Image (cartoon, grey):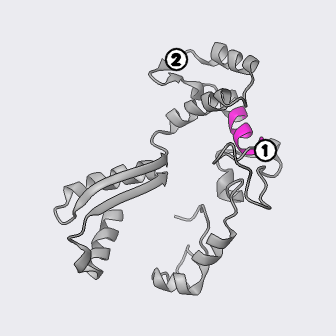
Amino acid sequence: NNVEALKSFYGKYPRLKTRPLFLFGQSYGGVYIPTLAVRVLEETEFNLKGMAIGNGLVDMMMNLDAVPQFLYFNGILDQSYWDKINTDCCKTKTEYGCQFSECPDVQGKVIQLTFSGGYNPYHLYEPCSIGVSPVYPKPEEMDYLSAALFYGYPCVNSTATIHYMNSPEVRRALHIPKDMPGIKEWWMCSLNP
């Protein structure tokens, strides 16, 4: 529980308790940070002054529905495919546009283009990190929704971060025992709870 982690932190560093607390997150932090902020506001011992989310995932369906629009308006989906998916898959509209998530074929193509189309999915107009492939292996056989769990993130060289987070000094500083079950190694994304 993140609130318990904050309480533990302030228990170890009570002199920081009166300082302003700002919560920041990105990606899935779009879920974690608002949730944590609500819990922090329920407690009287925290001095929460603000929160920020960068490139946050706040709603999975809205995210899935936005990707086809993003690809089209950036010239990755051609006009004929855009017209086709708007005709075939735009039966339900929300305030944000079509619910493309209702068409699994569209989602499959969009996810394949995003992660195996040769583009950097985190910065469309920048190349991938040196030596890092923008393409997952065997794209036609891949489950794109879970690919990052098994292959890492395309275009991101996380080698230095992985080495750093797994170093004995960092593990000691984070109080992670060497023999802790389920936490043998740190990865960018893990199936371990």
- Does residue 6 sit above or below 117 in this rendering? below
Residue farthest toward the front in the current orientation of the protein: 125
Q: Could you tell me if residue 1 is visible in this image?
A: no
Three-letter amino acid code of the residue under disc 2: Thr
The amino acid sitting under disc 1 is: Gly
Check residue 112 for magenta coloring. yes
Based on the displayed image, in which of its 4 quarters is residue 79 positioned? top right
- Residue 94: where, in percent of width, then height? 46, 21
Please name the residue that numbered disc 1 is placed on. Answer: 118
> In the image, is 42 to the left or to the right of 105?
left
Compared with residue 115, is residue 70 higher up or lower down, i.e. above or below? Answer: above
Residue 16 picture location, percent across and down = 26, 75
Q: Range of the magenta residues?
A: 109-118
Reading the image, the residue beneath label 2 is: 92
In the rendered image, residue 54, in percent from the top left (x then y), is placed at: 47, 49
Look at the image and say whether residue 12 sits in the magenta stretch. no
- Residue drawn at x 69%, y 20% is 82
Please report whichever mark, 1 or 2, sits nearer to the chain's N-terminal start.
2
Q: Residues within 10 Å of mark 2 (few under 14, many from 20)?
A: few
Q: How crowded is mark 1: few (under 14 residues within 10 Å), some or many (20 or more)?
A: some
Taking 127 as reference, is 97 above or below it? above
Instruction: Classify residue 71 as left or right of residue 98.
Output: right
Frontmost residue, 166 versus 75: 75
Q: Quadrant of residue 119?
A: top right
Give residue 77's quadrant in the image. top right
Please tell me which residue lies in front, 84 or 145.
84
Which quadrant holds the N terminus?
A: bottom left
